[in-house]
Image (spheres, helix red, strand yellow):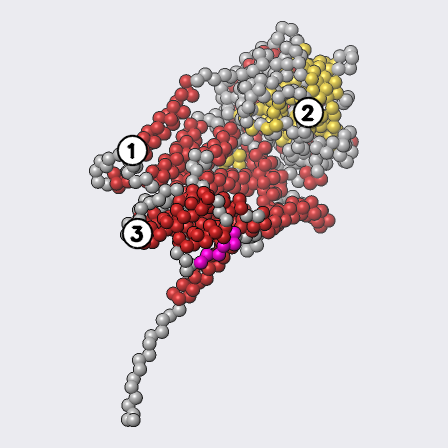
Amino acid sequence: MSGRARLALFAAAATLMTSCALLPLVSPATWIFQAAFLLAVQTGVGALTRRVPLARPLTVAVQALVTLMMLTLVFARSQALAGIVPGPEAFQHFSALLRAGADDVGRYSIPAPLSDGIRLMVVGGVLVIGLAVDTLAVTYRSAAPAGLPLLALYSVAAGLSGGGAAWLWFLLAAAGYLMLLLAESRDRLSQWGRVFGGAARGPGPESASGVVAPVRTGRRIGAVVLGVALFVPLALPSLDGGLLDGAGRGIGNGTGGGGTIAAVNPLVSLRDSLNVDEDRTVMTYRTDTGDTQNLYLRIVSLDDFDGTAWKPAQRHIIDVPDTFPAPVGLSGEVKRATIRTRIAAADWYAQDWLPMPYPASKVDIKGSWRYEPVGRTLVGDHGQNTRGARYEVTSLMVEPTAQQLASAPEASPAMKREYTKVPESLPAIVARTARKVTAGSANHYEQAVKLQDYFAVSGDFRYNTEVQAGSGSTAIANFLKEKEGFCVHFSFAMASMARTLGIPARVAVGFTSGTPQADGSMAVGLRDAHAWPELYFEGVGWTRFEPTPSRGSVPSYTQTNTPGEIESAAPKPTFSTSAAPSAEPSATESCSPQLRKLAACPEESSAAAVGAQDDDWPTTRILGLALAGLLVLGVPLLPLLWRTRVRAVRLGGHGRTEADVAAYTLGAWSEVTDTAWDYGIAPDESQTPRKAAERIVRVGGLDPEAEAAVHRLAAAVEQVLYAPHPRPVTGLAADARRVGKSFRTSASRPARLRALLAPRSAVRVIWMASAARTKLSTRLTPRRRPVPHHPSSQNP
C-alpha cells in the first residue's frame, strides 16, 4: 500500500472514531455502520482519483459528487433519476428531510429517535467532515489543519451529550487525530531515508525503514498528552446551582458560552419558597387579557424522570429568535388569543430562567439570553439573570374544548417513547392506582380529568407545605399512602401516573397568576411559586392540569366529564387578537409532523397540492440553476485546473535515486517549455536543450535572471541525457517558477489571460487520450498469423 493510500485510510479511521461521539445522541446507533460504509466508498474514490492523477480541485469535486450520489441512493432513491442521479425532486426531498430532522432535534431529548431526517443529518454530517479531513490531510498533505473539522464534529457531539462515557468519546477522537498525525509524519520521514532514523538496531522492516525513533517518540508524546487531558480535569472543581435560588446561580451555570443547559432537583428550593415568613414580591406585570387567573408564569419544564426525581433534560440552546415557531402539536382548529404581558422583576430576584406565560411566541428583552426550543424557555448566558429585568412577552392564550381533547388522536410513537418513559424502580402502586382511578375511561382525556379530580377533590388529599419533599423511588408511593403534600407532590404523582397510562406528561415549574393590585397590575410573590403537570394531546399540544387542591385555577376544559357540552359554546374559527405570523400555525398544522411521518394525514386536495408544489419549486429551481451554473463555469476552467495540477506534480517533491533525479529534471524542463508554449512559443523537438533555451530567451524577451534560469535548466537536462551518472541539481523548481514569472511580467494582459484560462499546452491531454486509445486498440486487436507461401508445383 502506498504512503498516500495509507494516509487516506487513517484519515477515514480518524473521522469514524471522532463520529463515535455522536452515538449517545441518537438511538438506535445503527447509523454508524451506514456512515462507515459510505465513508469507505468516499475514501476509495479519493484514492482512485489521486492515482489517475486528477488535479486536486477535481479530486475533491469527484469525491463530493460521488458522496451526493450515495446520499441520493440511500435517502432519495425514488425521487432521483435512475435511483442515483439527483434532480429537482431529490433536492426537494432532501430539503423536507432536513426540515423534519431539525424539528426532531429541537423537539426530542437525548437520545433522539433515529428518524429519516436525523439519520440524514448525522450520516451526511459525517461524510462532509470526512471529505474535509481527506481533502486537507491527503489531497493537500496537511494533516495538522485536518484536526479542525474533527474538532468541530467532536465539539457538537460533546456539547449536546453528556454522562460518564464522555471520556471514552474524547479518547477515541483524540486517538484518531494522533494516528493521522503519526501516519503523515511517518510518510514524510520515509522520503528522507535514514537521515532521522538513527542507526539500525537489527533486521526487520522497522529497522530498515529508518523512521523508528521519531515515530516511537511521537507515540510516547501522544500517550502522555492523552493522559494529561483525561486525568487532570478530574482534579478541577465544579459548581452547582438550584432552581429558584436567590443567589443567582439558578439552573444554568451562569458562565456563558455553553451550548447546553442542565438542572438540579427543584423540590427543596420550591418548598423553601412556599414556606418563607415574608411573602416578598418577585415581580409585577400588566397584561391585556382579562383572564389573569389562567395566566401562569412558567419558568422551566421537568421532563426527565429517573424514578428518584423529575428534572429538566439536558438540552441544546440557541440564540433567541425574533419570533418563536408555532407550538408543537397545536392545530389551527383550536381557539387561541394572542396576548401581551409587560413584566418587571424585583431588584433582589436573580433567576437564570426567565418567567413567561406559556406558550410564548416573542420576547423583547435586553441582555444575554439564550433560547431552549423544546421547552420554549429563555435561560441567561454569561452570568445574565432576571435581577431588575423589564421585558415584554407576546404569548398565546390557548382555549381548547373538552371535545377537542377527548377526540385527540394518539401521540406519535416518538413522543410516547420519550414522554411516557418510567423507570423500572417506580413502585407498582403508582401504575396500579392510576388504573384503578381511571377505570371505565373512554380516552386519555377522561383519564387525565379523573386523575386531576382524584387529587383535587375525591381522593381526600391535603395540601401541606411542611411535608418533606422526599427522595428516592418510594417518594411518590409514600405520598399516595399518606395523602399529604404540596404542589410538587401532586404534580409529580399525576405526571408519573399519566405516563403509566400512556399519556405523554411532564412537570412545569413557575408561578401562579399572583394578586391583583389597585393600579391594575398583578403582583407575584414567593408564595406563588408552583408546580403543575402538563399533558400532551395531539392537535392541542402541551396542556396544563391542576391537581393541587386550593392552589391556582382549574382549567375550564377539565371541569366537565361530558365532552361535547363545551363544544357548542365555543366558536370553531380560530380566534386571535394579533396578526403576528409566527404565533399563528399554518393551515397544515392540523396534521402534526409526527402524523405526517406515519402517513396518517388526510390527503390534500389537488388545489392544495399544486399550491405546495408552487411554494417549494423556487428552492429546487435555485438548486438546479446553481448546479447548472457550476457546470457552465467548471467546464471552461478544466484547462486551468489541468495545468495547475501538472505544474504541481512536475515541481513537487521527488526521491533521491538517479531515476528520481532524472524524472524531476525532465519534468522541470517540460514545465518551462510548456509555459513558453502557453505564451506562444511552440516547442521544437528537433532542437537540443541548449538551442531550445536560446530560442525561448530570444523570442520570449526574458529578463537576465530568467535567462540564467533557463540555461541552468538546459544544462541539467543535458547532464541527465548524456552524463553516465547524472548529479542532482538543486533549485530547478525555483528556476522554472522564475521563468514563468518573467513570462507573466513581460506579456500583455490578453496574453496572460489566454495562458491562464486557455493554455496551448493543454492539447497534450488530447494527445495522451489519442495515444491511450491507440495503445488500447492495439492490445484488443488480435494478431493475424502470417500465411505461409508455398512455391508453385507447375513447371515453367
- Mark closer to the chain start, 1 or 2: 1
Using residue 210 as the reference point, say whether residue 359 is left or right of it. right
State the image quarter where residue 569 is shown. Answer: top right
- Mark closer to the chain start, 3 or 1: 1
Indicate whether 552 appears above or below 758. Answer: above
Which of 606 and 118 lies nearest the eye of the viewer? 118
- Mark closer to the chain start, 3 or 2: 2
Q: CA distance from mark 3 to mark 2?
A: 83 Å
Total numbered circles:
3
Q: CA distance from mark 1 to mark 2?
A: 62 Å
Tell me the kind of residue under disc 3: Ala
Q: Residue at x 44, y 58 (%)?
A: 684
Residue of label 2:
363
Q: Residues within 10 Å of mark 2 (few under 14, many from 20)?
A: many
Q: Furthest residue to the top?
A: 277
- Residue 349's x, y, as percent? 63, 12
State which region is magenta.
679-684
